[in-house]
Amino acid sequence: MNSLLRPPLPGPSLCARSRVSPLPASGRLGSAALVGGGRRCRRGLAVAASAAPSWMEEAGVAVLEEGVRRNPSVSDSYRPAGLPRPNATVLEAQGRVCTGPGQTRPLGEEQAMRVLDTILRSAMGELKEEPVSSAQLGAFFAGMTIRANSFPEATQWSEGERRAMSIFWPRLVQVLPPEVKFIADPEGTIMGANGLTGPRYVGQGTGEMRLVGALREVLAGGHLGYEEVQCVLKDILPIGSNSSSTVVSEALLAAFLIGQRMNRETDRELKAYCLAFDDELGPPPVADVKSLTHYGEPYDGNTRFFRSTLFVAAVRACYGESCLLHGVEWMPPKPFVLLNDQGFQGGITEGQILKFMGANINLSPTQAKTLLEDENAGFAYLNLQEACPPLYSIIGLREHIKKRPPLATSEKVQQFVRARGRESMIAGFYHEGYEDPLLMLMRRRTVHAGLVVKGEEGALSMATKERSAHASKGLPVNHCSGFWTPNSINSSETDGIARESFRVIVNAQELGFESTETPRTDRSIMKNLELGLAALGGEKGAAYDRIVLNAAMADHLLGCSGAEDINTALDRAREAIDSGKALRRLMSYIKISHKVT
């Protein structure tokens, strides 16, 4: 059998056992496909219109044509209204000091003085236009405390930071709120005689008192148990302004979230984050489908390259591989860029693409189940706002802590809907060290197969570009690892469940793909949509190849039925596109999403 599921471990690369033929010339990216965004856009609109003429004029083409006029990008229109902006000076410093033991970059004296002066002036009420938020104070001082207490010498405080703190702390201690003084010196060992608030601080209310107790351990560089983390999260979330929300200091919550990430959370801590709100809306609905794949894309989206997952889901749904996507419209902390004084921007997400096309993106898990079962859809998208309100409630706070919290890992491994048939999970990662924890969380979910992919920008999209001989160190793009549950008595057993594991690097050239650069979208939803619609319309090129590659490799590496042979899997994905089935499903989804009840 021509299968890639059992490569030698570790496998140096992924290739077919019998080399497939290169794509015919007609299937390669021609120069015409690269000329003029308007031409590609018109092609995409024409394809979309011909796919569903009975309703696209109402729900699709009008929306897309309006998009052409507005030339939309991932802008403040997707950022929830009313969120206060973080202070840029302190946010920049957080990016340096609120990170891991080996990644922290201590501040120089000049920057440290500037940051502490900004905090002082804000606390005194002098920065009306750009105050330093409570969450920023909590994150910044948590970073400084953990570095002082537990980091290696190279990433502890610099001499410049020490001098700046010795000048400003006597004044800061007069104006900072007690919870921030606790975070800055929880045991009274860092600031000397000026740090006496910390040892006496207990917080207000049961939830906050539990959080303070957990923080003492975190700020000392320690770790917490599974139940302890779960209790803290359930005590303090959701946060918000309505009367039913928990009242808790955002400084304490921010310190807790960034502190756990800086300490490199343990498996038991990640499991607590992952499973804490499984029962928030009751038992998940069960879809009557033979196979369901849960897609865990990074919630903060793509800023540079074509994001293919939505189009891949439409392809796989054509042959019975149902797909559940989940995420948000907008999520920090992708690199912030100030554009034309319009504010910060983030990355492209599936929620933005679907919303821009006119789809209903505010579905409940039960409505998503209905779409998964619909023979004209077969995939669904869930917004975190509907699927897990407590976690959605802290999106604004996550912007103010700057760095990704543990939730950025655990949110990729969710089961908002279950299936009667086979279940699989795919998640993207970028930083080394999170590959095995993601697989651990997938095993904890008891799915039949799990796959983690180092795609471009840490997302799921594998590239067709040949890897340069001078590529940077670390795991390469297209690195994959995972497990599946075979019908084999020779498989190893973990947690009492027989599984077979693999680690491979997908080499697109050995699968017959021409090496091509990934199309850039640079935060433009319209450009991403143009590329995807044109590809689903049969236009051969880089976007088409990536959709085919990612659909077929998901089928193959997850052990899906009919994909044991990689060439067969590739042909099946191409047929779903070339026949027009995938495009019709995507267009039907927009219409059906407004009709489910």
Image (tube, grey):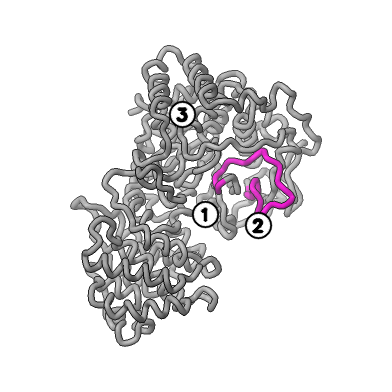
Which of discs 1 and 3 lies nearer the camera? The answer is: 1
The image position of residue 152, as x and y in percent, is 53, 76
Q: Looking at this rendering, what residue extends furthest in the right direction?
A: 18
CA gap, disc 3 and disc 2: 41 Å
Residue placed farthest to the top in the image?
A: 54
Callout 1 secondary element: helix
Q: Left or right? Give the position of 304 relative to 595.
A: right
Where's the C terminus, which quadrant? Answer: top left
Q: CA distance from mark 2 to mark 1?
A: 23 Å
Q: Position of residue 594 (x, y in %)?
A: 35, 26
Left or right: where 508 falls relative to 335: right
Q: Is residue 119 above or below residue 477?
A: below
- Residue 592 visible within the image: no
Crowd tier of the residue under label 3, counting other residues whose Cα lies within 10 Å: few below 14, some 14–19, many 20 or above: some
User: Mark 3 — residue?
Assistant: 373
Provide the residue designation for mark 2.
Answer: 474
- The boundaries of the magenta stretch are 457-483
The residue drawn where x is 67% and y is 36% is 516
Calculate the distance from the C-alpha at mark 1 to the C-alpha at mark 3: 26 Å
